[in-house]
Structures are given as structure tokens and as C-alpha cells.
Amino acid sequence: MKHKNKLLLFAFLSIMFLGTVSTSVNAQDVLVATSTESKSVDSDNLYNYKTYPNDPLNARIYTLGNGLTVYMTVYKEKPRIQTYIAVRAGSKNDPHETTGLAHYFEHMMFKGTQHFGTMDFSKEGPLIAQIEELFEQYRKIPMENDDERKALYHIIDSVSFEASKYAIPNEYDKLMSAIGAKGTNAFTSLEQTVFVDNIPSNQIENWATIQADRFTTPVLRLFHTELETIYEEKNMTMTSDSRKSYQALLEGLFQKHTYGTQSTIGTQEHIKNPSMKNIRWFFDSYYVPNNIAICISGDFDPDQMIKVINDKFGKIKSKEIPRFSYEKETPITEPLVKEVVGPDAEKISLAFRFGGANSEDIYKLVITDMILSNSAAGLIDLNLNQKQKVLSGGSFPMILADYSALVLNGKPKEGQTLDQVKDLLLEQIELIKKGEFPDWLITAIINDLKLDEIKQYESNGSRAMSFVQSFILGVPWNVEVNKWEMLEKITKQDIIDFANENFKNNYVVVYKKSGKDKNYKKIKKTKLTPIKINREAESDFLKKIHANKVPDIEPVFLDFEKDMTQFTIKNDIPVLYKMNTENETFSLYYITEMGSNHSKKLSIAIDYLEYLGTSEYTPEQIQQEFFKLGTSFSVFNSDDQVYVMLRGLTENMEPALELFEKLLADAKPNKEALDNLVSDILKKRKDSKKSIQSIFQSLVSYGIYGPTSSFTNILTEKELQELTAEEMIAIIKNLNSYKHKILYYGNQNKELITKLLNNYHNVPQKLIPIPPEVKFPELPTEKNTVYVVNFDTKQSQILMLNQSELYNKDKVPIVRLFNEYFGGSMNSIVFQELRESRALAYTAMAFYQMPSEKEKHSYSLAYIATQYDKIDDAMGGLIGLMNDMPEAEKSFNIARNSIIDNIRTSRITKSSVLFTYLSNQKRGLDYDIRKDVYKIVPNLTLNDLKEFHGKYLKDTKKTILVLGDEKELNFKILKKYGKVKKLKLEKIFGY
């Protein structure tokens, strides 16, 4: 059973809710009274904060004098802190004449300030002001006046080059690396822009110093090269059929609101005519403390944290925020039809519009979605997916501040039309309107959501993100804390009434059809002068951060003898055990070292299991019983392993284990289900040839193994159709018969676990040895070869690879340092040269990848996705760096220190201890390899990296994999890099 990804769903649930669930009770009236006002005290200041009873996060919520909101929750799993700085402004707030502005400014926030990212702002500043004025002139020139625009852009490029002489690209990333941060990123959506960093707990003051400066004096430097990067990102969105379908859905739902009339990435015309003046206005208007929240979760002292934040951010002046207003949408009275065309497989999406996060029906919308689809006992799950009436189907709620929607989607089976899928989805809503769903389902849904919250709150990222969502929609945290009280008041009749009132012919439907998108207009590259990198330069600001030393945190390495327990149950089956001391949930795994390389029929049998019942339960009843118990199961396999997983509430582990073991031992054959499964597999294979991700994956496999690999080691269509239900059942019933191991992470002691497994785990008296595995040799890279696969995509994808030596644990420290320095971050050599300096791609990376098993080879890899008219520069640039690595001592020191700081503050905990042990076994390790990295990396030099680069990357032969449209590719250019061979899809897929 595939478990629904409720992280997204709970993200929506967590940002609610004012309004009512019943007609007589107002959520805010009930819940606000539960708040408690407290104070953080130090010698000079009092900081008021709010807390709420029954809050699982024990959150403190502060509002500083300038309006800045600060959310805090302490979670000391590791000495690190997840930070999000959330701005309540997104693409819905973009000026109409410069859409995409919020997203573009998110990029510019990484370019530095008046104090960092510059060697001399007194000289750089006037040049940037000149560039701003030139862009204002440029955007007034009509698009058809090509010569005039080119002439002025040449001047912009010239002035930009002069300005770049004073810039220090990506010094923000150097700053964050210097303090041991990781996960540095940001994202923009319809109504939010969020900046992300995960920092060591001893770097709070340095982090706050950097961020306060960043949110006070940002500078729009290196503007025109970043603009070229935005073009590349726009090309990516126009390549993605799923993004185009989503945008079409928004345009149908919101014909007046900027949710639908503006896109986050912006129009091509607006991207080509940017306004630095409007961007500065946007910052001045929305990036103000009373429109920002700092959301943090991790290991820190809240009293110390709030003092530091107030000292750094408290001086920023608040301002009146522009009031966002919108015209109310006209009711949808009949289906509104949209169509999207692209190479991907066909699918259908439909959506019903509702009020925003503060509307009274939001809780009912969430419950309705889960009745439709919860990946176990929803109507779509059981009636469509379980009964194999569609290839796949589901639903999710899209909850925003001003409006929301319930979205349903589905993919057709072979020979099925999109309208037939649409009708099947709508039939499930009709069942809700008639009350044809179990009485117990709502209670089970609420329990499932509670379990999901428990598991989410084991992550600092999820804990802090729940604050972000609460803030962005302006929903009081006390409402979030007490949401269960409101959800539990919802009755079956409430949902029936809600469905009958809201689900009519008032929906938008998007038909995603396969074909060539004739509306696409290519964005041509702009002639740019590569900017100065100034790689060795450092601002005084960075020097001060370096000088502000903090107490070291000592690393903690795994000791497998102490951090986990090993014992055996009946038949000497080994068990790896780790106690869960945090909550009353469990995860249980059966792992067998046998996969598709041992039997091509294995994966089919595993997929078949989802559609089977037992002598006691129908397939639908099986799914319902697990859902009632607050548990879920899944069985899946890789090339060389089978994973059986059972997880959920500890109190129900015993009945869930008994039920699951009965399913494995008593599964009943179902010929119709197998026939449907085979038909669906063939349809999915056909669809894979329309997916750019699947095609590129198969191309990479071909580059490593050639035409014969585990990727192509599959049953033929004839072999699939000859399968019998009986042989599939035999494979399922034998899953526990092979030698295997068990992993347990939960809060029950090993004596009880031993008893439960001995009682319920069905195994024969003598376990069967694992059958031999079919081995697929990796092909040595003996000559330069360019493999090209033709696909209708608006942007080429290029991967260069070279086979290196077998796994060697002694290389781990130098490899980790090389990757960090050369291609692992925004401060890396590859990123700076190809994206920052030359604007050749949105994504560019190069690294040395070590294998997961000691019998496999390492590879040097380089990847870039770029426009067709940039391919020569992009490929030449990549190969140039792989042959001649630039040397920058200061960047090297930052990379080295960042690795050590991350090891000091990283902790491997919970079930990760068990899986780390297993992965180490595959590499022939019996200890924590991070010990070697921590010991050796501080003594490595830039010359060591140069020697590594010279041995493993410089002048090596390369297999080059290119995915792109043959009509756009320049084969004369490709031939410069090796012998070109065109590959058909049948060749790389094996069918």
C-alpha cells in the first residue's frame, strides 16, 4: 500500500483556521481564551510572548516592538537549528506590469548587501544605480525594435562588467558556510517568500548578524546575469507539463484574482523587461518587520535567542504595508474547460473553488479530501485505485489566504479516455453526497492525521514550517493547537450537507493531452560578457564573522555496539533494535537481500499484493482494517533487496502485525486483478517514454551499463501476459521464507518485540538461501562518446561521466572535501563559473560520486541543463573546469571548515542508526566513517585536491549523455566532444 504524502496535506491543515465548523460555535471565540502571556527575562529587557496549553511544540510566540513575529520551539535532537525567515508576499503581490518580481527578488537576496558581496560599495553603488536607470530605458523600447534593444543592452552589459569588478559573487554562501550552515535556499509561491538555513546551535549571533544586514541593505548586484538564470528557469517551467497544468488550473479557478492572472515565474515579456526600480519598491513595501516572521526549531535557549534577535532585528523600522485587494470571483456555474498540450502522458485535473483559510468550511474541506483519498480507505483509493478502474487517482486541498480549492486528478488506463476518468472521479463525490461512506471513517481520518502530526514533529524542518504556514495565512497559533477540537465536532451529516451544497457543475477541468506545444516561444540567449568572479576577495563583513569565534561543539560518532541492540528471534533471524524514547509509534521492517536482479517476476508479485485479499477479508477490507488501526504497510523492492514495512501506533502494533502476516500467508489469487495489473504495467511503460525524467534516467543507466542492465532486466510483454495468479501468490507466500533480517524502531522493549515476532512472524522451520543474482557489469569509459536521445523538450540536459575505481574507504575524506569545494554549493567552483559568471544554466554541478557497495565503481559526474543556443559554451565550460580546476585558497578553507563544522553538529539518530549500519555493511565498514573525515580533512591541502582532480577528472575519457530535440541540437558542436551516436527509446528502455 502506498501511503499518501500527508506532509503537503498537513501543511494545509496546519495553517488554519478562523471561522466555524458548526453553525453555532466560532473557533476564534473558543480558542483565544486559552492563551497565556509570559515574559523572557534578562538583565535589561522584558520580552513578552504567548504560549498555549496542549501545544505539542511548546511554542513561544513573540511580537517585537517593530512588529516582527518570532516563533520558537525547542527540539534538541541535534545541536542545530532550522531557521525560516518568512515574508508575507509572493507573486500575488507582484506589480501587474512586472510579474515574476517576487521570485526574481528572492534570487537577488543572495547577492549580498552594502556590507558584504562587495569590495568597495562606494564605487560599486553608483554603477548599480546607472544600471537601474538603463534598465528603465530598456523596458520602454518596444520588443520589435530589436537593434535598438541590443544596442542599449550592450551598454548595460558593459556597465555591469565594470560593476562586477567590485562584486564578490556568492559571498552570502561563503558566510553561511563559514558558520556551518547547510540547506541554504529559498522559495517563492503565490503569497510567500521564505528564506531557509539550518545552522549550528553555537552560531546564533553570527546568523542573526548576517540576516539582519541582509534584510536591511540588500543590493541588486550582478542583476543581468541572474536575469539570464531566470530565463533558464522559465524554460524549465515551460518544459514541465505538470507546471503548465497547474497554472491552467489556477487560471480557470481565479479569473480575477492574481492567483490566476499572474504566474510566480512571470511572463516572458516581463522577464525580458525587468525593473530594478520596481524591485526596490517591492522590498521597501513588503520586506518590513511587521510583514516578516522568524520561525525556528532546534537546540537553543529561547531567552538568549529572543535577546539576540531583538538586538539585531529590533532596530529595523516598521512601515504600513500596501493593502492587497481583489475583485470577488464570479461563481462558476458550469464546467470551465482548459487544455494543455505537451510530451508527457495524458492526465486530467479538476478543481472546485472554496473560500480562503479563514472561511468557515475549511475543516470540512480537509475531511472531505481525506474521505476521497487517504491512500488506504478513501473512496478514490478503494473504488478506483484498488479496483484498478484508473491507472492512478487522488485528491488534495489547495488552501490559500483568499481562496481555496479541492483538486482531483487521475491518469487513464490503456484505451480509457480522460472524460471517463473525470466521470469516475466525480462519481466518488456523488457517493459522499449520498452518504455512501463508512460511519467510522471520519474518526479514523482524524486519528490518522494525529499520527501524521506526531511523525512530522520529529523533524525540526516540519516543526518550523508549521509556524511559517500559520504566519503566512495570518492564522493564530492557538487555533492550530486546538484544531482537533474543531475537527472532532464534524459529523457525517455535516460532510453530506457540505458536499451537496458545494459540489455541482461548478468546477474547472484541465485536460493534459500528449502532443507538441505550439504556444511555446523560445527565449533566446542574451550576449553577455562573463563577470569577474573575484574568488579570493573577502569583505570586511566576512572577516568580522570569521573573527567572531564561538565555542566548539564536540562531534558525536556512532558506536553501533552502544547505539543499537542486536538479537535473534526464532530460526536465528537477526533483529536490529533501536528504542524510540520520543513517542508511542513504531516502524518495523523485514529486509531480504533479494530483488529484481534475482527474479524478474518479484516486483510484479509485490505490486500484485496491493490488490489481494485473504480468506477472511476482501482487498478493500484489508485496507480499511489497517486504516482503522492507525497503521500502514508497504512492500517494495530494489534491484537487490525486498523491503517489507509496517508502521503506526504502538498500541495497535500487535493486531496490525497479525493482520499483515495473515495477508502474506493467506493471500488469495485474483486473475482479474493480475490481468489489470499487467495491462497497467504496459501502459506505464508506454507513458515512461513520454516522461523526460524517466527517459533521462534510462539514458544514464545506458551510459553506465550499456543496453543490458537492471533497468532493462524486465519481463517482456509476452512474459507478462503469460504470468499466472498462482505463481504470483507463491512468490508472495515465500517472501518470509528466505533468509532475512528485521529492523525495529519503537517504544516497546526487546523482550516484548521478541515475543510478538515469535508469535506472529510466519517463517518455515528452515529458511531458504538467497538465489544467485544476475550481475550487470559497469562498462569502462574507454573513449569519448556522445549518446543523443531525441525528445521534445525546450531545454537540453547533458551529463558527462567517467568510470573510476571501486569503492575505497580511504578516499572518503578527500572526496567529500573535493565535492564541497568543486561542485557542491553556491560557493563552489562550478556554480560560480557556469551560473554566476557566465549565466549558462539554472542548474550546473560536478562531483565525484562514490558507490553504495564495495563491489561497484565510483564515477566523476558533471551535469548541466541549458538552452540549445548555449550548449557549446556550457559543454566547453564544464570540460574546461574538469580539465583545469581553478585554485582559490580562501574558498578551499571555507569548504574544509564547513565539513568539520557540519560533522561537529550532525547526529545520526532514531531509525537512521539502523539503516546506517546496513549501508556501512554494504561498503565493508563496521564503524562511523565520519571519524575518518573529521580526522583527515583538517590536514588536507589545496594541493591534495589538485592532485585528486588531476588523477580522477583531468583529461579523462567521457561518456556524454544528451537529451534534447534533434531539430534544435547542433550536431556539429556535439561532434567536437566525441563520436555521436543516436539512441532510440527502445534501445535505452529495453522495450
Image (tube, rainbow, N blue to C red):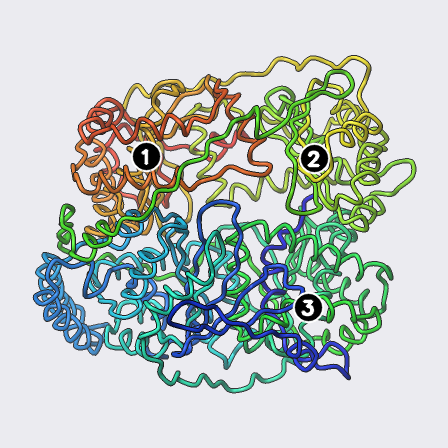
| Distance between the alpha carbons at the discs numbered 3 and 1 | 46 Å
Q: Which badge, 1 or 2, is on the more N-terminal residue?
A: 2
The spot of residue 279 in percent (x, y) is: 28, 73
Residue in view at x 57 percent, y 23 percent: 561
Amino acid type of the residue tagged 3 in the rendering: Lys
Residue 446 drawn above or below residue 142: above
Q: Can see residue 967?
A: no
Say which element carries label 2: strand
Question: Which label sits in the foreground, 1 or 2?
Answer: 2
Amino acid type of the residue tagged 1 in the rendering: Phe
Residue in view at x 24 percent, y 77 percent: 277
The spot of residue 69 in percent (x, y) is: 45, 72
The spot of residue 647 in percent (x, y) is: 71, 41
Residue 775 drawn above or below residue 416: above
From the viewer's perspective, tell me whether residue 22 is left or right of residue 831: right
Quadrant housing residue 848? top left
Say which element carries label 1: strand
Residue of label 3: 483
Residue of label 1: 847
Question: Which label sits in the foreground, 3 or 1?
Answer: 3
Q: Are marks 3 and 1 in contact (CB under 8 Å)?
A: no
Query: In this orientation, which residue lies closer to the viewer: 266 or 286?
Result: 286
Residue 68 drawn above or below residue 681: below
Q: Label 3: few (<14), some or many (≥20) within 10 Å?
A: some
Say which element carries label 3: helix
Q: Can see residue 458?
A: yes
Residue in view at x 26 percent, y 71 percent: 274
From the viewer's perspective, tell me whether residue 516 is left or right of residue 455: left
Q: Which badge, 3 or 1, is on the more N-terminal residue?
A: 3
- How many marks are shown on the rendered structure? 3
Residue of label 2: 588
